Image (cartoon, rainbow, N blue to C red):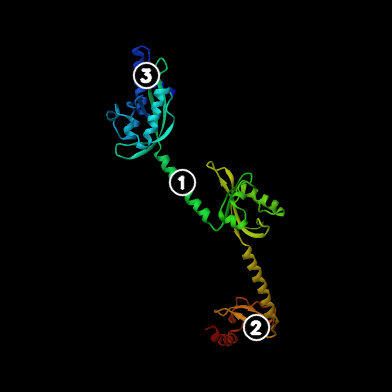
Amino acid sequence: MNRVLRAIGVLLGRDRRAPGEREGELDLVREAFDQTSVGFTLVSLEGDYLVVNRAFCEMSGYSKDELVGESCRRLTHPDDRSADDAALSGVRDRGAPPPVTEKRLLRRDGKEIWVRRNSGLMRDASGAPRFVICAFFDLSEQRARDRALQSTNRFLTAIIETSPVAIYATDLDGMITLWNPAAERTFGYTRREALGRRAPFVPPDKKEEARQLRERALAGEVLTNLELIRQRADGTMIVINGSAAPLRDDENKIAGLLVMCLDATEAKRAEAAFKEQLHFTRALIDAIPNPVYFKDLEGRFRVYNRAWHELWGEERDWVGKTVYDMFEREVAEIHGARDRPLLE
């Protein structure tokens, strides 16, 4: 800003060098001031525009002739005027430059845009403020990106918060930084109890396993379909099906881990019960002394008992086969005729 102030001094003819020496530099300063992409204004201590450059005119939609001599309040959103008035009062009363601020600028077409204003003071020989020089940066694109980012973050937050899957994240040190409601239900720890500490649900005898998995994920590997034993806050052991992936920052550097878990305890119990029932059923069928078999609707053998196996020879595998695969056609037709009414 100090360089800009010196340049404006040249532009206003405050440079004390010889006129011939100043003219060339004055032309360069005027061209630079007008061609820069930053919107510049020179404002009186009462808030009137004295000098404006092309970028500010394009930003506001007004011409130089329309702006010079006008109050800057004309382009200031009503909600921002009191702050601008206070800033000018600070300049007049205390010689304090206006603070950096983000405000709304009212364009000529009626639209409003967000800008960032940086300000400095031009002083006279005694050090008293004479003018305020302001640099304006259009924040429209940045604000649009911010709104899009906020919308995306709200959407992702809603997914995480309402997901039936337990989701949590950790930093590079293993400290939990995110903990959703499903994680509370799965592991029994509230968000307050979980955040800021290492995974409290890893049993002592599983900590080495957890460390190895964490190192793999931090090395960039995506881990899926992990069947792990974990411990709830009440001491209950549970089986989870988990996945883990590295979290990356804006520079694509790994900054932590994102983990998703499903409580598979009931599913594992149901699977064990099913296997037990299957073994019982198999033993029951094998205990029947007469040959027994089951076929699907297409006539393929699915299950048969020991008596059937011994009847036709133990070296023959009937599963997935039809009578036409296992017998001569004449014999197969006889068996097929017997089965057909049942299959239809």
Q: Which residue is mark 2?
A: 292
What's the distance in space between the residues labelled 3 and 1, CA to CA? 44 Å
For image coordinates 38% across by 25% down, the residue present is 132
Q: Nearer the viewer, mark 2 or mark 3?
A: 3
Question: Residue flagged by tag 2: what amino acid is it?
Answer: Val
Q: Which element type, helix, strand or loop, lies under badge 1?
A: helix
Whole-percent x and y of residue 124? Answer: 39, 17
**Residue 31 falls left or right of residue 257:** left
Cβ–Cβ below 8 Å for labels 3 and 1? no
Q: Nearer the viewer, mark 3 or mark 1?
A: 1
Q: Which element type, helix, strand or loop, lies under badge 2?
A: loop
Q: Which residue is mark 3?
A: 10
For image coordinates 30% across by 39% down, the residue present is 110
Query: Which comes before the other along the chain, label 2 or label 3?
Result: 3
Q: Which residue is mark 1?
A: 150
Q: Which element type, helix, strand or loop, lies under badge 3?
A: helix
Whole-percent x and y of residue 154? Answer: 47, 49
Which residue is at the front of the view, 171 or 275? 171
